[in-house]
């Protein structure tokens, strides 16, 4: 990361943590689009993350995070349990970071929600969704969804703007102002299993997934025991220059269709159908495994199985799920 950018963010982080920055909120019901948002169309042994019968420990926190070049380096991605990569208008991408094990002090830049987020979030018990706003016709659907919609209007004390960045890439969340504490791993009802590596697979040095106007490359680092993330041909890093490095990467092939919502230019928002079944690739420990994914309903998690039907476990640590269009 360029030294100037690092110095700028160091100043920004200090300002965020002391609240010595100005807050700018968007008008609306759940949250109208803010400045610049008018372009939005709206254990160690094998164990499942989902724990049927476990007592509720509070909601997970899901945050919609900007992913254009002006938004990088993002803050707080390294603390997420799961990072979902989603397509949006213009062939670009957006991230949804899900927090259960711990809450970072700051996350962002925060951006707007999409229709398919509601289906994806159905797997959790009334999650808190932090986002900057949404397409006007989508807001009633968000209000009716089984989640806590946390916008700058509803929780102004939780959001701050970085005056050193241009809008709309400057809205940040302070998670501790939304949740008293992290709910813990038992709230992470994704259906994912963590444990020993499956047998077989093939050696994989790097894997690239491309959207029309965005790309993600995951390069195996044996020294780190992690997949180093690259975005649009450049290393993806934290504000202090550390590489983003999940333990497991899932390339999940899904059906994508046009949403009923579109941006101000008329471009339809892609709708990711995360309920259903299809093929996926699980990258862990420097190997790629061809698997089948299945999610029976929006209220359920997603299972991943090998060709013989046995469950496939992920490595302990952060998981990135990249949604890719079924060929």
Image (cartoon, rainbow, N blue to C red):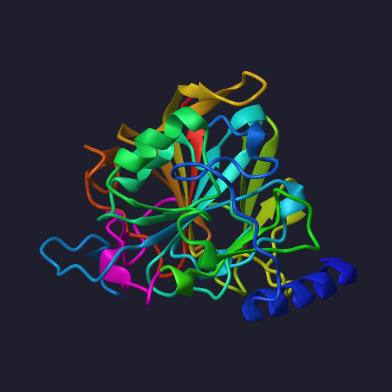
**Residue at position x 55%, y 71% from top?**
225
Classify residue 126 as left or right of residue 241: left
**Residue at position x 32%, y 67% from top?**
195
- In the image as oriented, which residue stretches furthest toward the left? 53
In magenta segment, residue 140: no
**Residue at position x 33%, y 67% from top?**
196
The N terminus lies in quadrant: bottom right
Answer with the quarter of the image where residue 23 lies: bottom right
**Residue at position x 66%, y 61% from top?**
74
Answer with the quarter of the image where residue 281 lies: top left
Q: Is residue 105 above or below residue 295?
A: below
Query: Residue 208 appears at what percent x and percent y?
Result: 63, 43
Q: Is residue 117 above or below residue 58?
A: above
Query: Residue 191 appears at what percent x and percent y?
Result: 27, 54
Could you say which is closer to the camera, residue 119 or residue 18?
A: 18
Could you say which is closer to the camera, residue 299 or residue 23?
A: 23
Q: Main secondary structure of the magenta part?
A: loop
Q: Which residues are magenta?
A: 179-201
Residue 292 shows in this picture: no
In magenta segment, residue 198: yes
Query: Residue 306 appears at what percent x and percent y?
Result: 30, 46
Query: Residue 194 appears at what percent x and percent y?
Result: 32, 65
């Amino acid at each position: 990361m360029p030294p100037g950018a690092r110095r700028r963010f160091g100043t920004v982080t200090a300002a965020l943590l002391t609240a010595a920055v100005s807050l700018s909120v968007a008008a609306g019901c759940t949250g109208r689009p803010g400045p610049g948002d008018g372009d939005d169309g709206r254990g160690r042994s094998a164990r499942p993350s989902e724990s049927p019968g476990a007592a509720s420990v509070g909601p997970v926190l899901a945050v919609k995070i900007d992913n254009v070049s002006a938004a990088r380096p993002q803050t707080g991605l390294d603390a997420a349990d799961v990072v979902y990569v989603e397509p949006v208008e213009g062939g670009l991408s957006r991230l949804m970071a899900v927090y259960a094990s711990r809450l970072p002090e700051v996350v962002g830049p925060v951006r707007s929600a999409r229709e398919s987020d509601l289906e994806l979030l159905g797997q959790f018990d009334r999650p808190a969704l932090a986002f900057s706003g949404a397409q006007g016709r989508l807001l009633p659907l968000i209000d009716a969804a089984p989640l806590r919609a946390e916008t700058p209007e509803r929780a102004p004390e939780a959001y701050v703007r970085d005056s050193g960045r241009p809008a709309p890439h400057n809205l940040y969340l302070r998670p501790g102002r939304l949740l008293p504490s992290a709910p813990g791993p038992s709230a992470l009802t994704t259906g994912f299993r963590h444990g020993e590596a499956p047998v077989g697979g093939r050696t994989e040095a790097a894997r690239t997934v491309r959207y029309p106007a965005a790309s993600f490359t995951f390069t195996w680092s044996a020294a780190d025991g992690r997949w180093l993330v690259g975005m649009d041909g450049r290393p993806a890093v934290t504000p202090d220059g550390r590489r983003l490095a999940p333990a497991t990467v899932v390339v999940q092939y899904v059906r994508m269709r046009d949403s009923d919502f579109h941006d101000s230019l008329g471009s339809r928002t892609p709708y990711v159908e995360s309920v259903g079944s299809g093929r996926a690739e699980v990258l862990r420990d420097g190997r790629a495994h061809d698997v089948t994914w299945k999610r029976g309903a929006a209220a359920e998690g997603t299972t991943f199985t090998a060709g013989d039907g046995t469950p496939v476990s992920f490595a302990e640590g952060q998981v990135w799920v990249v949604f890719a269009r079924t060929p």
